[in-house]
Amino acid sequence: MESGALKTKDIQKVYDRLSIVYNCFDIFESKAKNRSVELLTRFPAQRILCVGSGTGRELWQIRKRIGCEGFLYSFDLSFPMLSLDHGQSSIFKCQGDASHLPFAEGVFDQIYAAYILDLLSVNEIPEVLSGFYRILNPDGRLVLLYLSEGIDIPSRAIVRLWKKLYRVSPYICAGCRPLKLAHLVKSSGFKIQENEVIVQYGVPSEIIVSIKIHE
């Protein structure tokens, strides 16, 4: 386990408690989330898995965009988070750990994971990416959204402060810290197609869109 990184059970406790107020973080994340949904829903009638779906706010946008022939699955570690998506019957819900995805090989066209990998230790991330690779079909796409390094003076200053607070205690930062993940994505069998960083009120979020490379 990476020094300071929270264990799965601790992450679950943190986000169980944050579930009621989690949408407040949209002030820093909404632009990146909206852009991620745009990139995710370029194709209709897709079978999509949202890992770390949180309160479900983005799910409604995705559900509408993929059409009635698409299938949308919501997967989250926190049951209180899942319970806040209003029980929409057209979205299949499952609680669990992203390190142990209970799905068959090659069943999804796309996977969307927002602000999940930046909670995990560096040693755990390849295991989760390997799971994503396994359950995507041969032409499957992976859309990742996570807290990234800064790209301008304000965002770099915030990232420096964030890292200092994380070293004091990851609980201060809800277990999340800035990362650069492109090299891990590539080494897990994906080819990066698009990569962009969006800064909102000084907080940098990075989006990586990649495709599964055929074995």
Image (cartoon, helix red, strand yellow):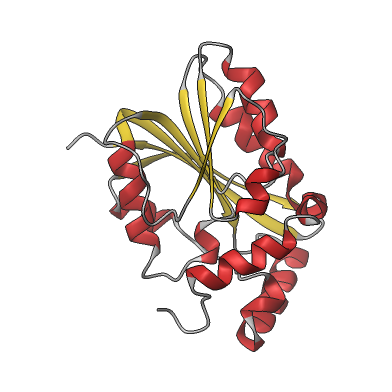
Where residue 161 appears, as percent x and y from the top left, is: 72, 78
Asked if 4 appears above or below 10 in the picture, the reply is: below
**Which quarter of the figure is the C terminus placed in?**
top left
Which is nearer the eye, 136 or 187?
136
Q: Quick check: 138 left or right of 128? A: left
Where residue 82 appears, as percent x and y from the top left, is: 63, 45
Q: Which residue: 61% across, 71% down?
A: 175
Where residue 210 appears, as percent x and y from the top left, is: 41, 39
Number of marks in the rendered image? 0
Asked if 199 appears above or below 37 in the picture, the reply is: below
Residue 143 visible to the viewer: yes
Q: Quick check: 125 left or right of 21? A: left
Q: Which residue: 65% across, 68% down?
A: 14
Residue 34 visible to the viewer: no
Which is nearer the eye, 178 or 7?
7
Which is nearer the eye, 69 or 17?
17
Q: Quick check: 140 left or right of 194? A: left
Q: Which residue: 36% across, 44% down?
A: 102
| Residue at the extreme left of the image, as rendered | 215
Q: Quadrant of residue 106?
A: top left
Q: Quadrant of residue 109?
A: top left
Q: Which residue: 75% across, 44% down?
A: 30
Where residue 139 appears, as percent x and y from the top left, is: 32, 27
**Which quarter of the figure is the N terminus placed in?**
bottom left
